Amino acid sequence: MSKLCVYLGESLGRYGFPDGHPFGPWRMMAFWQALRDNNLEHQVSIHSPIIATQEAIERFHSHDYVERVKALSITGQGYLDYGDTPAFPGVYEAIATVVGSCLDAVENIMKNRCNKVFVPIAGLHHARRDSAAGFCVFNDCAVVIETLLQEYNVNKIAYIDIDAHHGDGVYYGFEDNPHVIIGDIHEDGNYLYPGTGDSNETGTGTAKGTKLNLPMPPGADDDAFFTAWEILESFVTEQKPEFILLQCGVDSLAGDPITHLQFSPQCHKHAAQRLATLTDYCAQGRLLAVGGGGYAAHNIKHGWTAVVEGLME
């Protein structure tokens, strides 16, 4: 079996905001150092970042919005949303590299060059088709899903999200699409941005029942996660997806400065292990994991290395 593929490189690490923003450009190097410290660097296959074409980005995002990001990328001034997501010089190239690396991962998976891949600086699940939101300029997860549907004719994709924040950009982007299965464990929207992801949000129209939201109360611990995970795993297994996309944000771990969940890295390792097993059973081993949020260095180090270990096992 081929090694786990991990995307790392300076151009990928550029996606991060300056001036002490929680989503800073230090995040990729923190993970890369942790890979070395845990003697994992030589147990994975390192792939270089790739920049996406504008055409590929516009599989999900509107042309006018992409053009606006390009314009603000030149000036580096202003905000791409209402105040969480500032522009900076080169932001377009940085976010296009996040998207492009995920799309390159998809190509490698679909052509059987890799079966399981981890892209740490990715998982920007809040961006909508025509706007940025919550530190997310483009939604790489949604572009991946559209690419699998449009370019590879994948009939059933499972999107699993264990970030502390509800993956609203993905949910509302595909809430009426029965080909996209969603399972999302997150902090209750009554206590945390973006305020969505209630358990009664299960999809609309012909997609009713293809989405599962499992909101957790502030302070929820490993026991709560494992209970929710059993429900999620059973739901996804019944759907028999042909491709699995895992958003494994580590802001759901205890000690994150902007969230309130109390999970340990064992939760992330378990999710990665279980999905790796499931994808071998029903999806020809096709699993892409993306890093998502996480704003404490120790959580990035321990949480994402736990994901790598889980995918390798």
Image (cartoon, rainbow, N blue to C red):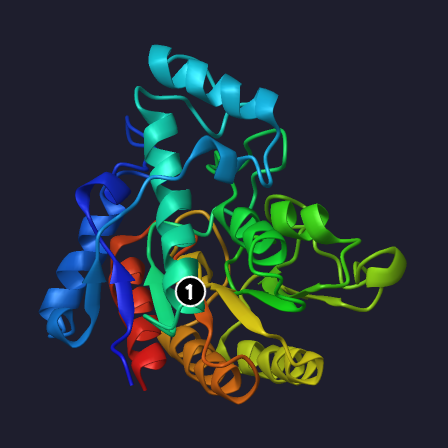
The kind of secondary structure element at disc 1 is strand
Q: Residue at x 32, y 37 (%)?
A: 15
Q: Residue at x 62, y 52 (%)?
A: 150
**Vertical relation: 34 (above or below) 82:** below
Compared with 175, 87 (above or below) is above
> Residue 80, can we see it?
no
Residue 65 picture quarter: top right
Q: Is residue 233 left or right of residue 272?
A: right
Q: Position of residue 152 (x, y in %)?
A: 56, 60
Give the mark count.
Answer: 1
| Relative to 252, 297 lies left or right | left
Q: Left or right: 276 with respect to 170?
A: left
Name the amino acid, label 1. Answer: Ala
Label 1, residues with CA under 10 Å away: few <14, some 14-19, many ≥20: many
Placement of the N terminus among the 4 image quadrants: bottom left
* Residue at 47% across, 87% down: 277
Q: Nearer the viewer, residue 308 or 188?
A: 308
Q: Is residue 231 left or right of residue 123?
A: right
Q: Residue at x 57, y 49 (%)?
A: 142
Residue 27 image offset from top left, x and y in percent = 26, 48
Residue underneath mark 1: 289
Q: Position of residue 242 (x, y in %)?
A: 59, 74
